[in-house]
Image (cartoon, helix red, strand yellow):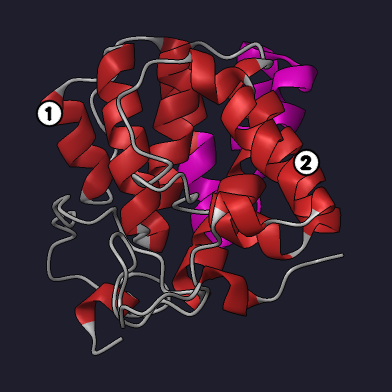
């Protein structure tokens, strides 16, 4: 049985960690159905748990934050979705820097507060500098000395902006990264773009108490994010 959103409600109008305007109440672990529990345990008990604890993906009550709460509402979609995310983060041939460059390009283009909050910290741990992070956040191309990183960044920027790769960029990506890595990169960009869309629609921002990224005056492809309005 799949629990309804009511299982997350409490007597507080906006419980801890639940931002005003959020469209999906945070689901409490003790009230999850069997299929929801499987998703919950896959998220909290997998490689994310074993990685560096530089981000918060649960609140003090154990409720999932960011994109993971939405996965509980549809376990049939949420379980394979989180597994795809784990594969892209932990089982591709990319270095940690390459992977985080691509994810942050998506987060910046979509102006996704939670995606940037999480992967800025993971990227910093992977060795991205403040200058590199600032360039990506502002929509530019950082000065990268490694040719693979430059190709990953250029390809990710073109895919997220145009929804395609030009022949020259595709040819360079295959020559530099290999066909398997290009498949992984296209999938990665699509996956994190889908998460950014979900979090925009469901009004998911950075965790309570964390600063909102400074996106600058330029609007993203969908206009100002929900954090910029009255949501």
State the residue at coordinates (31%, 83%): 13
46 relative position to 109: left or right: right
Kindly identify the residue that appears in the image at 62 percent across and 35 percent down. Answer: 43
Image x and y of residue 28, in percent: 54, 57
Q: Residue 192 bears which disc, if any?
A: none
Cβ atoms at labels 1 and 2 below 8 Å apart:
no
174 and 124: which one is in front? 124
Q: Nearer the viewer, mark 1 or mark 2?
A: 2
Residue placed under numbered mark 1 in the picture: 131
In this image, 42 relative to 63: left or right? right
CA gap, disc 1 to disc 2?
A: 40 Å
Q: Is residue 10 above or below residue 49?
A: below
Label for residue 38? 2
Name which quarter of the figure residue 119 lies in.
top left
Question: Quick check: 139 above or below 197?
Answer: above
> Picture coordinates of residue 32 (x, y %)?
69, 56
Q: Position of residue 92 (x, y in %)?
A: 67, 17
**Residue at point 53%, 74% (across, down):** 24
In this view of the protein, which residue sits in the foreground, 66 or 29? 29
Q: Which residues are magenta?
A: 155-184
Q: Position of residue 91 (x, y in %)?
A: 68, 15
Asked whether 36 falls inside the magenta stretch, the response is no
Q: Answer whether residue 108 is visible to the viewer in this image.
A: no
Q: Split into 4 quadrants, where in the image is the C terminus?
A: bottom left
Residue 183 highlighted magenta (yes or no): yes
Q: Is residue 218 left or right of residue 147?
A: left
Within 10 Å of the Cα at label 2, are there few (<14), some (14-19), or many (20+) other Cα atoms? some
Sequence order check, earlier mark of 1 and 2: 2
Considering the numbered disc 2 on the image, is that residue within a helix, a strand or a loop?
helix
Q: Nearer the viewer, residue 52 or 173?
A: 52
Q: Which structural element holds mark 1?
A: helix
Q: Visible in this render: residue 6?
A: yes
């Amino acid at each position: 049985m799949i629990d309804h959103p009511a299982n997350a409600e409490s007597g507080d109008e906006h419980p801890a960690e639940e931002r005003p305007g959020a469209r999906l109440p945070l689901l409490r672990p003790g009230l999850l159905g069997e299929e929801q529990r499987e998703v919950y345990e896959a998220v909290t008990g997998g490689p994310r748990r074993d990685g560096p604890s530089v981000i918060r993906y649960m609140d003090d009550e154990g409720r999932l934050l960011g994109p993971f709460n939405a996965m509980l509402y549809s376990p049939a979609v949420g379980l394979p979705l989180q597994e795809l995310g784990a594969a892209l983060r932990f089982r591709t041939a990319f270095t940690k820097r390459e992977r985080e460059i691509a994810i942050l390009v998506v987060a910046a283009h979509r102006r996704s507060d939670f995606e940037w909050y999480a992967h800025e910290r993971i990227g910093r741990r992977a060795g991205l500098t403040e200058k590199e992070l600032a360039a990506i956040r502002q929509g530019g191309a950082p000065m990268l000395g490694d040719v693979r990183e430059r190709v990953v960044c250029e390809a990710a920027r073109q895919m997220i902006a145009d929804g395609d790769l030009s022949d020259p960029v595709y040819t360079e990506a295959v020559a530099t990264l290999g066909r398997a890595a290009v498949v992984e990169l296209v999938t990665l960009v699509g996956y994190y773009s889908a998460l950014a869309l979900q979090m925009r629609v469901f009004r998911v921002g950075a965790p309570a108490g964390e600063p909102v990224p400074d996106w600058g005056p330029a609007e993203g492809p969908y206009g100002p994010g929900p954090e910029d309005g009255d949501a």
